Image (cartoon, coloured by chain):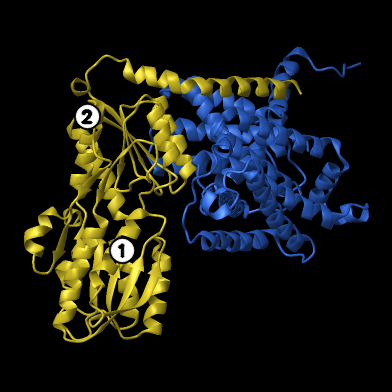
């Protein structure tokens, strides 16, 4: 039993060390004496996932921006595991990073992570997903999901109106634990409000940000309502599932040809750009990933300098469609990846 | 008359061989690997030898250890429990629903935290018992039973919350997972109970006997069915206890909590030396297995390696541990 007693003693010693860690971390970051602007910084970047093009683009944009400034980036991806992300951020704190950029899993589970950074006096900025209101202090750089979706869907509705008939619509909803998904759903609903003579929503498909669920959902919807002629997805990364389902139903046609299903999305990824270029996609709301990356890093600098920032820094984004494709594609991150 | 004792030259060859076999067969083999790994990688890993990192390592290892102990009990019987991750998610949302002031209805009552914890443990035990019943009484393969439970229970947890996380949990509950000292005390108590159960009780002997050969165990009078049901119930309850810690750390009940840790759980138990074919496993081995896996995780994270590298390295280490385990059984005749 002696080794067990030794392990137990060691563990108790370590756990008591944890009680002292907050104070020691805070002292180290505050007491270095250098001004924030004159030394290369080390930034911890913790993403919840790299499973879609958008997150990869965001990750790479941050990496490129930090490299350009001559700063060091420490990276961590938690693969959807909240507790692992907390561990990763604590590792950043252990390494005394100068700032943390975080993509949390959702708006609630990130609160202890933000509190840990607060306790260590390390500025923390959330990329694209804001936290719930709480005593935890953070800044989030986020697209105006509601406004941008509303603008995109309003364009799609105006296209639908041109046909002079009523369209049956399907909406692919994201994970409702994600405030961005809620904003996009609400933006869609706001855009079609009062347009009941043009749009009738016959299917609301919960995807939980899963391509498989989107695929089965849209196939089922097309079977139940073969006359669906208007589809909006809350994220462009679900387009391959939609296209596959439409092809299976013989409904994937270019804009202007008979049987075309009006398609709209959100994000502005490479698939959406290709579909726009080939004339299948009507419009998508583009998040400006480069703007968001730059704002995150600038916000860390500002917070280190003691400036008071708003809790939300908005990325206005823009709608790209067949009418402005040439003019706007240079700003679309998905177009840069092709 | 030739001497039966080896000559000095022969002894010089035999001694290292004997020591090597002893090291391979030792209960502390994986602990030795942990020390060697820490000494080899630690100096090149920024922040590794700091009290903060040690505390971080400990706080993340404790809930994993609890789930791994439950998995070990099931593996000793020759089964496997794939449903532990879903049990963690379901218990997390159950506890959160009980303790949340809006959905729970207890509204800050001093019984809120005990009620939430008891509900979580009961749910874990109930799901585990259902698994055990299907394996023992319906004679279904544990892999299929627990796979089906993983899917069903996981889906039920998502449906229950409509995919939404539940927060506003009592601070006293959050402290159970967030305060390393409390978590350590509870984990040590749970590990101690499992240790006593395995080594000092008739039930422990029944578990090993069932894992070695259920038919022989049955003929010898071991109530194999009851032992299996109890083993899965223990696994479910320990997963529920881990859920208390995970939920407390996240300060939120989530149906997808712990969904990605199955590889870590099985990996840690196997690295420790518990046999996938049953009849072999110890608490100490599992502690060392968890420690080794968390050490790898921790150092790779501190080195800021990409998720792709991290996953590949972890997979390779688990594979290596399984190969090494098979080899040490062959070479050293590892004791059961």
Q: Are marks 2 and 1 in contact (CB under 8 Å)?
A: no
Measure how far apart labels 2 and 1 are at the Cα level.
33 Å
Please, is residue A336 above or below residue A102 in the view?
Answer: below
Please, is residue A231 above or below residue B193 in the view?
Answer: below
Lateral position of residue B294 relative to residue A105, left or right = right
Query: Which of the two residues, B244 or B140, is positioned nearer the viewer here?
Result: B244
For mark 1, what is the residue? A186
* Quarter of the picture holding the C terminus of chain A: bottom left
Query: According to the colouring, which chain is blue?
Result: B
x 20%, y 29%: residue: A70
Residue B184 coordinates in the image, percent (x, y): 63, 30
x 44%, y 19%: residue: A23
User: Total of numbered circles in the picture?
Assistant: 2
For mark 2, what is the residue? A307
Residue A223 coordinates in the image, percent (x, y): 40, 83
Query: According to the colouring, which chain is yellow?
Result: A
**Residue found at the far left of this picture:** A327
């Amino acid at each position: 039993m002696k080794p067990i007693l030794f392990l137990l003693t060691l563990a108790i010693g370590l756990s008591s060390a944890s009680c002292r860690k907050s104070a020691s971390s805070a002292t180290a970051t505050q007491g270095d004496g250098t001004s924030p602007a004159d030394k290369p910084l080390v930034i911890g970047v913790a993403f919840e996932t790299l499973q879609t093009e958008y997150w990869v683009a965001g990750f790479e944009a941050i990496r490129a921006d930090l490299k350009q400034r001559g700063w060091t980036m420490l990276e961590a991806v938690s693969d959807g595991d909240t507790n692992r992300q907390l561990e990763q951020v604590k590792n950043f704190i252990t390494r005394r990073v100068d700032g943390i950029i975080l993509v949390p899993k959702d708006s609630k589970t990130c609160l202890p992570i933000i509190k840990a950074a607060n306790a260590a006096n390390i500025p923390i900025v959330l990329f694209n997903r804001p936290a719930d209101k709480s005593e935890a202090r953070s800044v989030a750089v986020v697209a105006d999901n509601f406004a941008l979706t509303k603008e995109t869907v309003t364009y799609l509705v105006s296209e639908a109106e041109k046909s002079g008939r009523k369209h049956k619509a399907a909406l692919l909803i994201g994970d409702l634990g994600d405030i961005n998904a809620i904003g996009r759903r609400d933006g869609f609903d706001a855009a079609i409000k009062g347009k009941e003579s043009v749009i009738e929503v016959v299917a609301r498909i919960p995807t939980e940000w899963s391509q498989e669920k989107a695929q089965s959902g849209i196939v089922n919807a097309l079977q139940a309502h073969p006359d669906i002629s208007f589809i909006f997805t809350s994220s462009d990364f679900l387009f391959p599932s939609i296209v596959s389902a439409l092809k299976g139903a013989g409904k994937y046609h270019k804009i202007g040809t008979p049987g075309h299903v009006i398609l709209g999305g959100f994000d502005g990824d490479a698939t959406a750009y290709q579909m726009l270029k080939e004339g299948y996609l009507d419009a998508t709301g583009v998040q400006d990933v480069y703007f968001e990356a730059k704002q995150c890093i600038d916000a860390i600098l500002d917070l280190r300098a003691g400036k008071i920032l708003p809790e939300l820094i908005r990325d206005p984004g823009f709608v790209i469609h067949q009418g402005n494709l040439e003019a706007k594609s240079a700003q679309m991150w998905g177009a840069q990846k092709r | 008359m030739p001497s039966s004792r080896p000559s000095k030259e022969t002894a010089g060859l035999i001694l290292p061989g004997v020591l090597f076999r002893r090291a391979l067969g030792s209960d502390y083999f994986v602990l030795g690997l942990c020390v060697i790994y820490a000494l080899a990688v630690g100096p090149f890993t920024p922040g590794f030898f700091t009290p903060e990192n040690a505390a971080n390592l400990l706080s993340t290892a404790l809930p994993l250890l609890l789930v791994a102990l439950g998995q070990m009990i099931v593996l000793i019987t020759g089964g496997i429990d794939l449903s532990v991750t879903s049990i963690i998610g379901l218990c997390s949302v159950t506890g959160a629903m009980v303790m949340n002031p809006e959905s729970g209805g207890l509204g800050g009552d001093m019984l809120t935290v005990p009620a939430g914890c008891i509900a979580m443990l009961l749910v874990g035990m109930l799901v585990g018992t259902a698994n055990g019943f299907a394996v023992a009484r319906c004679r279904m393969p544990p892999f299929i039973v627990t796979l089906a439970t993983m899917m069903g229970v996981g889906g039920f947890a998502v449906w229950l919350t409509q995919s939404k996380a539940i927060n506003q949990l009592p601070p006293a509950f959050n402290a159970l997972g967030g305060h390393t000292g409390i978590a350590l005390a509870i984990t040590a108590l749970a590990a101690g109970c499992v240790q006593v159960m395995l080594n000092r009780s008739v039930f422990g002997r029944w578990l090993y006997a069932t894992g070695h050969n259920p038919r022989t165990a049955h003929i010898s009078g071991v109530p194999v069915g009851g032992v299996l049901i109890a083993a899965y119930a223990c696994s479910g309850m320990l997963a529920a206890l881990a859920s208390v810690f995970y939920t407390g750390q996240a300060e939120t009940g989530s149906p997808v909590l712990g969904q990605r840790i199955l590889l870590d759980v099985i990996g840690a138990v196997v690295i420790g030396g518990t046999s996938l074919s049953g009849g072999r496993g110890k608490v100490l081995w599992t502690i060392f297995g968890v420690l080794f896996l968390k050490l790898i995780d921790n150092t790779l994270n501190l080195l800021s390696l990409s998720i792709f590298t991290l996953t590949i390295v972890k997979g390779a280490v688990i594979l290596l541990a399984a190969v090494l385990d098979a080899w040490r059984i062959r070479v050293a005749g590892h004791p059961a």
